[in-house]
Amino acid sequence: MKFLDEYRDEALATKVVDEIRRTVTKPWVLMEVCGGQTHAIVKYGIDRLLPEEVELVHGPGCPVCVTSLEMIDKAHAIAQRPDVIFCSFGDMLRVPGSDVDLLVLKSRGADIRVVYSPIDCLKIARANPDKKVVFFAIGFETTAPANAMSVWQARQQEIKNFSILVSHVLVPPSIASILQSPLNRVQGFLGPGHVCTIMGYREYEPIAERFRVPIVITGFEPIDILQGALMAIQQLEAGTHEVQNQYARVVQRDGNRVAQDLVNKVFEVCDRKWRGVGSIPKSGYKLRYEFHEHDAERLFNVKEIDTQESSTCISGLVLRGVKKPHDCPAFGKQCTPEHPLGATMVSAEGACAAYYVYGRHLEAKNGGRSSGDADRTSSSLTAEVA
Amino acid sequence: MGKANFGGIVKQVCLEYTPEAKVDDYVLVHVGFALSTIDEAEAARTYELLKEMSQLQELEVPEIREAMSGGP
């Protein structure tokens, strides 16, 4: 397929890896921000193609993972109401709240539906005028234009029985928070290509400057990720800290202005609690007051719920790049994608789930390679690309 | 709304955010919305750069390897 297959070319990947080997002279720690990038890295074994000096740690960019337990419990409280049709992206259904998940509630009779797009909910709302249709609006900046459009159209079309439960998160405050932490090990970032498709990358420039870290806006195919890593390493070796754009076929410096305009009309920035990380100032979106008729949190007046996370789970440290999935005693044992203890095992984009799905827990059990080991092979790339 | 072909599967896609998109353009789609039209010229340029880099490498490999083993 055009603009995909050429970015999975094995021979080209090998060349970029060789160039990285030639460039690197000392150890560097890079963080890929997006869950989609983490998934590609583990799927294609990109971390094992890189020279041992280069360590990839996995970032907070999995929207399902970072949705707070309080917000999931609120979703559950709303979804259980007999007058509600609760709509969500599929991967939120298995996320454990304090008690159960949405799938269990559905099996107990709650009307919970999986939608492909928030716009689908408007159709459901029109077809069910006696019900209240609520969409669980999670996600990063990438998803905000779609969610904003659903509310905008609901108002234009006077669909009064549609509301959204907003749990939007923003990337720049989260990476600034990672860099400010005394535990931080990250020296350069592979920036979030799809978030920047919407937002552009101007807002990353002050972060690169302030913390003196290179940030390379990077795509999601193996060649994209390898080239992003190469560009970041070239900067680290040269001692520069610029924002660069590897994903120029999709991302422009100013982003998508049309989308930004509607997002800003519908949402405003607010403080947001991240699962496993805690509250980060100005790191989320909430609905503007003028759209309060479509604000599920307000309409259903869900009270703050006292929540309890698993005490063994280290997902907060994994999300900040301080620990790897292997470092957790529960990984692949008590904690699996079927029975996740925490955020990063829940979604396919979570680092723990990616490690599990691609069999890294088996290697760990066998006393084999960990992510830091020197035994690197191109076989995994060959297998997937061929 | 428009129709987008995902490697054989055709779906309705909202084009509100990509007013510049024309028939036969490639678009990046997320949850039913086209978010960006793929810049073919930029894609070709990046790809050529990568290929060029690898050609240069082939020419330079022995020299660079020597230099690396000898110096810091």
Image: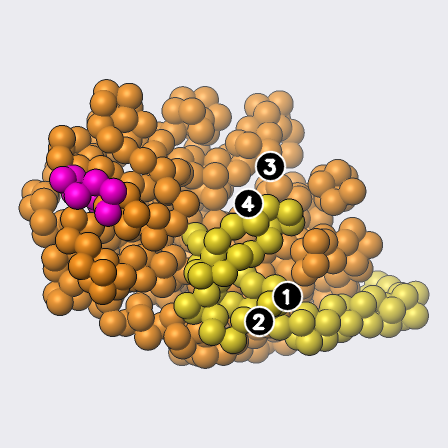
Chain colours: A orange, B yellow
Image location of residue A203, percent across then percent down: 40, 75
Q: Nearer the viewer, mark 4 or mark 1?
A: 1
Is residue A332 toward the left or the right of residue A370 in the image? left
SS class, disc 2: loop
In the rendered structure, find residue B24 and report the number of the disc placed on it: 1
Image location of residue A63, percent across then percent down: 38, 49
Is residue B5 toward the left or the right of residue B51 in the image? left
SS class, disc 4: helix
Image location of residue A47, percent across then percent down: 63, 48
Pointer 3 and pointer 1 on the same chain: no
Chain for mark 4? Answer: A
Chain for mark 1? Answer: B
- Spatial separation of the CA atoms under disc 4 and disc 3: 17 Å
State the residue in front, A123 or B67. A123
Residue matched to label 4: A39
State the residue in front, A121 or A247. A121
